[in-house]
Image (cartoon, coloured by chain):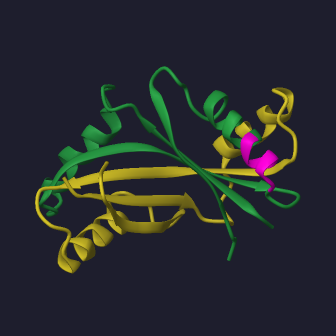
Chain colours: A yellow, B green
Amino acid sequence: MPRIVVEVMPKPEILDPQGKAVNGALPRLGFSGITGVRQGKRFELTVDGPVTPEVLADVRRAAETVLSNPVIEDVVRVEAEESE
Amino acid sequence: MPRIVVEVMPKPEILDPQGKAVNGALPRLGFSGITGVRQGKRFELTVDGPVTPEVLADVRRAAETVLSNPVIEDVVRVEAEESE
């Protein structure tokens, strides 16, 4: 079944408390060398037909309206992916 | 600054209420043709030096212990990415 991956990240100017929390936890847990963490979302959408350019355009529209909040988030990836 | 992307998804056998909610909302909002949605997480880690194999191994270890819960989640991607 073809799969489309959509990835959403908080805009750079938006505070990201989850990422900050992870960033603060890493050194305490023995992981050094990481200077910043941002946390976003990854969606895997299954579609029931072939991934045509129309389907991809539709998913891109969904990504920008339903899967992300365009005020605070950027859609960073919309891509078909062969499922294993 | 080099960036490492870590992606985490709920294991296939685990219920994913967030993904289910999105999946239910899409047809109501006019998006058809999508038969399934799974929601996971995407992390962008900034590291302060070059991404050596050691750094990547370290991040992979962090991904499997801190960034994901190995009981219910799979790390699906750990990859260096040039920042724009």
Where residue B26 appears, as percent x and y from the top left, is 20, 55
Q: Nearer the viewer, residue B82 or A54?
A: B82
Q: Nearer the viewer, residue A43 or B31?
A: A43
Residue shown at the point (31%, 41%) measured from the top left:
B19
What type of secondary structure mainly makes up the magenta span?
helix
Q: How many marks?
A: 0
Whether residue A16 is situated above or below residue B63 in the rendered picture: below
Whether residue A55 is situated above or below residue B74 in the rendered picture: below
Q: Nearer the viewer, residue B14 or A61?
A: B14
Q: Nearer the viewer, residue B80 or A19?
A: B80
Where residue A16 appears, as percent x and y from the top left, is 66, 50
Say which quarter of the image contains residue A22: top right
> Does the magenta segment cover residue B38?
no
Residue shown at the point (87%, 57%) measured from the top left:
B48
Residue shown at the point (38%, 31%) measured from the top left:
B11
Where residue B81 appears, as percent x and y from the top left, is 65, 65
Residue shown at the point (80%, 37%) measured from the top left:
A24
Say which quarter of the image contains residue B69: top right
Which residue is the extreme one toward the front? B53
B31 left or right of B80 in image: left
B75 left or right of A63 in image: right
A37 left or right of A10 in image: right
> Which stretch appears magenta?
B52-57
Where residue B56 appears, as percent x and y from the top left, is 73, 48
Which residue is the extreme one toward the top? B71
A79 left or right of A26 in image: left
